[in-house]
Image: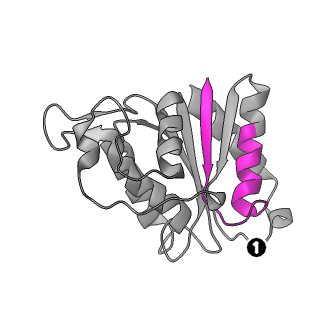
């Protein structure tokens, strides 16, 4: 399988990146191809809500010509996608949220019987980290991800929240097992 991972953290080696690398290593060990995209290095303009992307139903037709268009093409070419982000102020980082907004270009006919998506049937997973518990912190982001998955007509394969994060070396070892679970569920 070709699997694209989207790292939405500003830190290349922070908590989210560390756990994502464990998932990626597990997937590579199973023989899967990983395309790792570090979003903080990319130029992703905000969605204009102009609807021009709906004029082309068989490709990403966004009016912006930035890195997001290339990344969305990569998602369409993948079999599975992992979205990874720390939780900032009860939601995803700006790096990941901007790309999620631009995913509007991947669908047509939302709320109609002929609703379709260029990502239809692909498997997706969510990894999120945070300094606090899940409750009253991350649940809104997970709800938003479930809504995004439905909008894109993808199969939501696995979600993992790692709370009480401080530094990567302090992440409890049992999360390596959760990373392996994540990888197996994503390709099941």
Task: Please report the bounds of the magenta region as a residue range.
Answer: 1-24
Q: How crowded is mark 1: few (under 14 residues within 10 Å), some or many (20 or more)?
A: some
Residue 3 is one of the magenta-drawn residues = yes
Q: In this view, does 65 lie to the left or right of 163?
A: left
Q: Give the answer, above or below, for where 184 lies relative to 96.
A: above
Q: Give the answer, above or below, for where 137 lies relative to 161.
A: below
Residue at horizontal 67%, vertical 66%? Answer: 10
Q: In this view, does 60 lie to the left or right of 71?
A: left
Residue at horizontal 48%, vertical 69%? Answer: 91
Residue 110 is one of the magenta-drawn residues = no
Residue at horizontal 69%, vertical 27%? Answer: 33
Residue ranking furthest to the right: 169
Which residue lies under the disc numbered 1? 166
Q: In which quarter of the image is residue 78?
A: top right
Give the image location of residue 89, x and y in percent: 51, 77
Q: Quadrant of the N terminus?
A: top right
Give the image location of residue 80, x and y in percent: 54, 33
Q: Quadrant of residue 122?
A: top left
Report if residue 112 is visible in the image: yes
Q: Give the answer, above or below, for where 165 lies relative to 89.
A: above
Report if residue 160 is visible in the image: no
Residue ranking furthest to the left: 112
Colour scheme used in the picture?
one colour
Give the image location of residue 94, x and y in percent: 51, 67
Is label 1 in a helix, a strand or a loop?
loop
Q: Quadrant of residue 177?
A: top right
The residue nearer to you, when weighing 76 against 168, is 76
Q: Is residue 117 left or right of residue 22?
A: left
The residue nearer to you, when weighing 40 against 125, is 40
The residue nearer to you, when weighing 145 against 106, is 106
């Amino acid at each position: 399988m070709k699997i694209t991972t989207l790292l939405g953290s500003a830190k290349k080696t922070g908590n989210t990146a560390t756990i994502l690398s464990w998932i990626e290593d597990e997937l590579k060990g199973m023989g899967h191809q990983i395309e790792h995209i570090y979003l903080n290095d990319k130029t992703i303009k905000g969605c204009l809500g102009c609807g021009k992307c709906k004029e082309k139903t068989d490709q990403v037709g966004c009016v912006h010509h930035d890195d997001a268009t290339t990344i969305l093409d990569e998602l369409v070419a993948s079999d599975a996608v992992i979205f990874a982000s720390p939780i900032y102020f009860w939601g995803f980082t700006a790096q990941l949220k901007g790309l999620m907004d631009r995913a509007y270009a991947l669908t047509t006919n939302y709320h109609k019987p002929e609703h379709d998506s260029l990502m239809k049937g692909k498997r997706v997973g969510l990894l999120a980290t945070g300094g606090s518990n899940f409750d009253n912190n991350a649940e809104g982001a997970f709800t938003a991800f479930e809504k995004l998955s439905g909008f894109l007509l993808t199969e939501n394969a696995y979600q993992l929240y790692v709370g009480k994060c401080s530094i990567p070396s302090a992440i409890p070892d049992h999360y390596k097992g959760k990373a392996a679970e994540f990888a197996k569920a994503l390709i099941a």
